[in-house]
Image: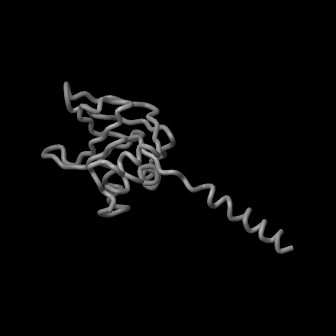
């Protein structure tokens, strides 16, 4: 009877652990900053999808403007918002109401060579990218 009870308890707890989601991000580098006229910005890289030797700024994630993302993340996480966006991208986007999956639609601004705005659809959001960010020069989680 004890074995049966232990088995039932284990099975009832298992679904709670299976819903733990792996953190992922579509970026291999992220930098937050501020510039005159433009205000806050988020510089991003992912050499598999756009030239890492050029400067790219995030404009939208799944159709939501980056300024709204920053505003909502600040409201939810306070001064920790940069850490949340950089290293906990999936969880943070969902917390502010942006439904991201393992593929993300982005709008970027290419600062170099013509100031071009372009869309990227279905950019993979991976756990490996989170590790790239965690070991980059820009550190937001202490």
Residue nearest the viewer, comparing 107 with 19: 19
| Vertical order, 123 against 24 (above or below) | above
Residue nearest the viewer, comparing 73 with 8: 8
Q: Residue furthest top?
A: 114
Numbered-mark total? 0
Q: Quadrant of the N terminus?
A: bottom right
Q: Position of residue 105 (x, y in %)?
A: 42, 36
Q: Residue at x 40, y 48 (%)?
A: 131
Q: Position of residue 109 (x, y in %)?
A: 27, 34
Q: Residue furthest bottom?
A: 2
Q: Quadrant of residue 118?
A: top left
Q: Position of residue 100 (x, y in %)?
A: 48, 44
| 80 to the left or right of 37 | right
Q: Residue furthest left?
A: 36
Color theme of the render: one colour
Q: Position of residue 12 (x, y in %)?
A: 72, 64
Residue nearest the viewer, comparing 73 with 102: 102
Q: Residue at x 35, y 55 (%)?
A: 72
Q: Quadrant of residue 2?
A: bottom right
Q: Quadrant of the C terminus?
A: bottom left
Q: Residue furthest right?
A: 1
| Vertical order, 77 against 122 (above or below) | below
Q: Residue at x 68, y 64 (%)?
A: 13
């Amino acid at each position: 009877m004890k074995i049966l009870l232990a088995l039932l308890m284990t099975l009832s707890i298992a679904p709670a652990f299976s819903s733990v989601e792996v953190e992922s991000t579509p970026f291999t580098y992220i930098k937050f900053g501020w510039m005159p006229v433009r205000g806050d910005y988020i510089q991003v890289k992912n050499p598999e999808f756009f030239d890492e030797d050029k400067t790219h700024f995030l404009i939208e994630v799944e159709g939501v403007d980056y300024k709204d993302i920053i505003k909502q993340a600040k409201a939810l996480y306070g001064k920790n918002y940069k850490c949340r966006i950089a290293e906990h991208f999936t969880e943070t986007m969902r917390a502010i109401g942006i439904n991201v999956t393992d593929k993300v639609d982005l709008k970027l601004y290419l600062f170099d060579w013509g100031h071009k705005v372009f869309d990227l659809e279905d950019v993979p959001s991976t756990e490996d990218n989170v590790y790239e960010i965690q070991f980059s020069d820009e550190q937001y989680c202490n």
